[in-house]
């Protein structure tokens, strides 16, 4: 059982018991949150998320449905296995929009771009946009600030829901 829990921590988020904007992990950071918030009594898990939302330093929280306690963490990922019925919820990286000449679409194209550019490492979303602008048959791109990956695609329309912190941007 311990090995299974460790495995789940390593492979990352599971199907969620966490509010929108958070990924559910099996695990815990030892102790009762941080100076941001420790053992706060809240009406529901969504209030714990609202508290964490309000603090840029808050990267995750733990919440227990049985005790309605909320711990706010500065660490993003669990370091030990699950504690009691606490859900560990990790804040998703903000998407932060599209550069000029592009508009944001709330979705993702399956796969990784086209022959124009797939899984290219670029340091900024503006560079990814310029790569797409440079090709007349590129109509969209997607970019992640955390992975620093740029995919550019000949299709204008995304065909599935949002993926991680990838922002899908369509050429105007
Ligand atoms: C806690 O309760 C909420 C609201 O009923 C539910 O969505 C969530 O899945 C529960 N979390 C856990 C870890 O059971
Ligand atoms: C390689 C790849 O994933 N290309 C995609 C570009 O967008 C079109 C339209 O959504 C997809 O069909 C392709 O799979």
Image (cartoon, helix red, strand yellow):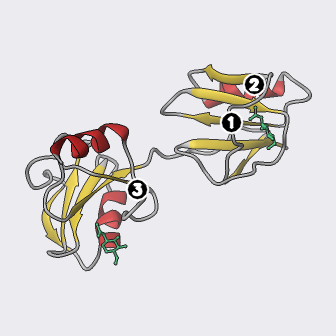
On screen, 25 above or below 118?
below
On screen, 165 above or below 15?
above
Along the line of sight, which residue is nearer the eye, 74 or 112?
A: 112
Q: What is the x, y in percent for residue 59?
A: 31, 47
Badge 1: how crowded within 10 Å, few (<14), some, or many (20+)? few
Badge 3: how crowded within 10 Å, few (<14), some, or many (20+)? many
Q: What is the x, y in percent for residue 50?
A: 35, 66
User: Quadrant for ligand 1?
Assistant: bottom left
Q: Is mark 1 within 8 Å of ligand 2?
A: yes
Q: What is the x, y in percent for residue 117?
A: 74, 22
Secondary structure category for the residue under label 1: loop
The reply to whether the C-beta atoms of the residues labelled 3 and 1 are less than 8 Å apart is no
The reply to whether the C-beta atoms of the residues labelled 2 and 3 are less than 8 Å apart is no
Return the disc, 3 or 1, that comes first in the chain's sequence: 3
Which residue occupies the extreme bottom position in the image? 43
Which of label 2 and label 3 is nearer to you?
3
Residue beneath label 2, please?
130
Residue beneath label 3, please?
22
Secondary structure category for the residue under label 3: strand
Q: Is residue 76 visible?
A: no
Along the line of sight, which residue is nearer the eye, 9 or 29?
A: 9
Badge 2: how crowded within 10 Å, few (<14), some, or many (20+)? few
Which of label 2 and label 1 is nearer to you?
1
Q: Say which residue appears at 22% left-offset and 49% top-offset.
A: 27
Q: Is residue 108 visible?
A: yes
Which residue occupies the extreme right position in the image? 136
Which of label 3 and label 1 is nearer to you?
1
Q: Which mark is residue 111?
A: 1
Secondary structure category for the residue under label 2: helix
Q: Does residue 31 appear to the left or right of 75 in the view shown?
A: left
Q: Which mark is residue 164?
A: none
Structural distance between the alpha carbons of marks 2 and 3: 31 Å
């Amino acid at each position: 059982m311990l090995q299974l829990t460790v495995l789940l921590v390593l492979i990352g988020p599971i199907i969620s018991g966490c509010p929108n904007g958070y990924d559910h992990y099996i695990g815990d950071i030892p102790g009762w949150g941080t100076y941001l918030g420790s053992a706060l009594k809240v009406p529901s898990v969504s209030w714990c998320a609202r508290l964490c939302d309000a603090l840029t330093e808050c990267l995750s929280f733990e919440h227990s449905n049985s005790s309605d306690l909320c711990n706010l963490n500065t660490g993003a990922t669990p370091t030990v296995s699950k504690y009691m019925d606490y859900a560990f919820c990790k804040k998703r990286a903000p998407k932060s929009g599209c550069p000029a000449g592009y508009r944001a679409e709330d979705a993702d194209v399956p796969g990784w771009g086209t022959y124009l550019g797939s899984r290219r490492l670029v340091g900024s979303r503006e560079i990814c946009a310029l790569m797409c602008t440079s090709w007349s048959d590129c109509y969209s791109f997607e970019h992640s600030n955390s992975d620093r990956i740029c995919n550019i695609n000949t299709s204008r329309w995304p065909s599935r829901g949002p993926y991680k912190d990838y922002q899908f941007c369509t050429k105007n």
